[in-house]
Amino acid sequence: MYGKRIRECRIRQGLTQQQLAENLGITQKTVSKYETEFLDLSTEMLIRISKYFKESSDYILGMETEDGRKLY
């Protein structure tokens, strides 16, 4: 679920994978791996992505909806 949410946030802000990668200090290939969930998110990266998109980590992980309702 986190891959889908990262991709949705990126597209909503009109960013390419390369642009997001540059903003986070990682490679485009790493962004791609996160979006396809080929690479697990570290806690540090989850926090960085959450802060960057101004979303909760629960939202990025798919544990809440866009309006903040908990799904668990």
Image (cartoon, grey):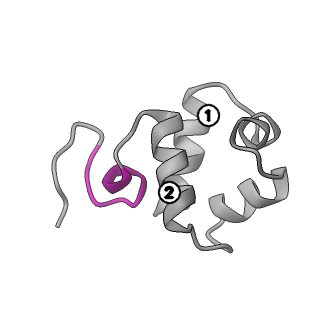
Residue bearing mark 1: 11
Residue bearing mark 2: 46
The location of residue 3, given as percent across then percent down, is: 56, 59
Question: Do residues under tags 1 and 2 come within 8 Å of each other at their CB atoms?
Answer: no
Question: Looking at the rendering, in which quadrant would you find the C terminus?
Answer: bottom left
Question: Which kind of residue does numbered mark 2 sit on?
Answer: Leu
Question: Which kind of residue does numbered mark 1 sit on?
Answer: Ile
The location of residue 9, given as percent across then percent down, is: 53, 38
Residue 30 appears in which quarter of the rendering? Answer: bottom right
The location of residue 55, given as percent across then percent down, is: 39, 39
Earlier-in-chain disc, 1 versus 2: 1
Compared to 60, does 51 lie above or below? above
Region of the chain picked out in magenta, as a range: 57-65
Residue 15 appears in which quarter of the rendering? Answer: top right
Q: Is residue 41 left or right of residue 66?
A: right
Disc nearest the viewer among 1 and 2: 2
Q: Is residue 60 left or right of residue 20?
A: left
Secondary structure under the numbered disc 1 in the rendered image: helix
The structure residue drawn at horizontal position 59% and vertical position 73%, both measured from the top left corner, is 40
The structure residue drawn at horizontal position 42% and vertical position 33%, both measured from the top left corner, is 54
Residue 58 lies in magenta, yes or no? yes
The structure residue drawn at horizontal position 53% and vertical position 60%, both measured from the top left corner, is 44
Q: Nearer the viewer, residue 53 or 9?
A: 53
Determine the CA span between mark 1 and mark 2: 18 Å
Compared to 15, does 59 lie above or below? below
